[in-house]
Image: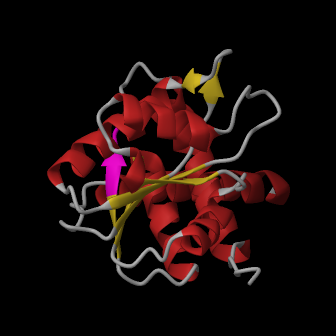
Amino acid sequence: MKILKLIKNCLIMFLAYLIICNFVIYLYAQQQPIDNADTVVVLGAKVIGTPARPHPTLKKRLDIAVTYLQNNPQSNVVVCGGQGKDESATEASVMADYLKKHGIDSSRIYIEDQSVRTAQQFIYANNILPLGKTVVITSDFHLLRSIMLAKRSGIDKVSGLSAPLDLANRDKYRALLREPLALINSWLFDHPKSDN
């Protein structure tokens, strides 16, 4: 009987954590980015097909980035993301091509194509270009953890711009479970350090 009660209490605490954490993630995604950032960092996500093209989750991030970059023409952009085992190109190269096709001058675009985890992206991006005042663009569910990791990577002047996922995008529903777990994992274990 005591074991069943313990299991029940653990499940209740776990569900409470998921609900509270998802509420905080939602609130955090509502923030507004700083204007005139030195650098925009667009975090990678899956690319699909051959030739590679952005998955809808990544396309949403890139469309948000295009709008911000058009409204802030002095901002440079670092696109981040290596190549997964099931991807035909690096996420960063696909992202750079997308931005160029949507009117962003190639002189403003920097490619970080070595990272495979969010915890690496800010360190690697800062090695390519001193980021300065930074706006991070990522999916709404991913923004809280990304800002935390950016600050842990030494980027003090950072704000976020979320790319809200459509209700039809399955990633939104996976994130309801995955992101609270990833957040606690990153909070406990991800402390990025520069290799330099």
Main secondary-structure element of the magenta-colored stretch: strand
Asked whether residue 36 is in view, the answer is yes
Does residue 36 lie above or below 196 as drawn? above
Left or right of residue 74, residue 83 in this image: right
Quadrant of the rendering where the C terminus is positioned: bottom right
Per the rendered image, the range of residues in magenta is 161-165
Left or right of residue 35, residue 100 in this image: right
Estimate the x, y position of residue 69 in percent, counting from the top left.
26, 50
Which residue is pictured at 73% across the width and 28% down the height? 87
Which residue is pictured at 68% across the width and 79% down the height? 191
Estimate the x, y position of residue 91 in percent, counting from the top left.
62, 39
Q: Quadrant of residue 47?
A: top right
Which residue is the extreme one toward the front? Answer: 107
Which residue is pictured at 69% across the width and 58% down the height? 10
Q: Nearer the viewer, residue 74 or 53?
A: 74
Estimate the x, y position of residue 176 in percent, counting from the top left.
52, 42
Asked whether residue 172 is in view, the answer is no
Q: Nearer the viewer, residue 114 or 45?
A: 114
